[in-house]
Amino acid sequence: MTEQLSKKVVLAIEDERPLLQIYKIMLEKYGIHTFIAEDGEQGLDLVKKESPDFVILDIRMPKMDGIEVLRQMRADPKYKDIPVLILTNYNLEEYRSAVRGLNVLDFLVKSDIEIKNVVKAVKEFLEKNQWSRF
């Protein structure tokens, strides 16, 4: 664990609780402080409270979907530049279109990737401030 990573904060907004727990455990192994939210409203509240360095965001969630969370983040000057990774089960063009122009790092489909690779990519982004596909 580097001291640089121990100062970083990641927020995972996802309605699948087991997945949230995996993100938290794996990111915290790198020393990255990780907050989790099970719905969009809770996630947006945590964005405002914690000002994370990185957000992993699902799209289809209760209370507020990820697209609305992202829109509200981008509309607020305090949160508009927080890096966001969309990670969803739905590889639909309507979702891809909805997030285009909202400054997302990437749009990934959960079934196409391994969680460990997502976590590693987030860690490397926080170290280098540069996103690379895995």
Image: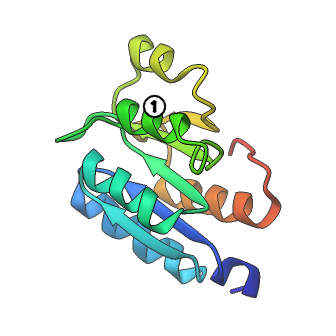
Q: Is residue 109 visible?
A: no
Left or right for 133, reference 119: right
In which quadrant of the rendered view does residue 89 lie? top left
Which color scheme does this rendered protein use?
rainbow
In which quadrant of the rendered view does residue 98 lie? top left
Of the 4 image quadrants, the one containing the N terminus is bottom right
Give the answer, above or below, for where 116 lies relative to 134.
below
Which residue bears the numbered disc 1? 71
Is residue 72 or residue 52 the one in the foreground?
72
Is residue 18 or residue 58 the one in the foreground?
58
* Crowding near the residue tagged with mark 1, few <14, some 14–19, many ≥20 C-alpha atoms within 10 Å: some
Residue at horizontal 32%, vertical 69%? 21
Instruction: Please tell me whether mark 1 sits on a helix, a strand or a loop.
Output: helix
Of the 4 image quadrants, the one containing the C terminus is top right
Give the answer, above or below, for where 11 lies relative to 62.
below
Residue 46 position in % (x across, y down)? 38, 61
Left or right for 110, reference 125: left
> In the image, what residue type sits under mark 1?
Arg
In which quadrant of the rendered view does residue 107 lie? top right
Left or right for 83, reference 107: right
Residue 122 position in % (x across, y down)? 62, 58
Is residue 21 or residue 115 the one in the foreground?
21
Count of all numbered marks drawn on residues in the image: 1
Give the answer, above or below, for where 41 lies relative to 68.
below
Residue at horizontal 52%, vertical 34%? 75
Residue 4 position in % (x across, y down)? 75, 80
Residue at horizontal 74%, vertical 87%? 3
Q: Is residue 122 visible?
A: yes
Farthest residue, direction front: 77
Is residue 83 or residue 107 the one in the foreground?
83
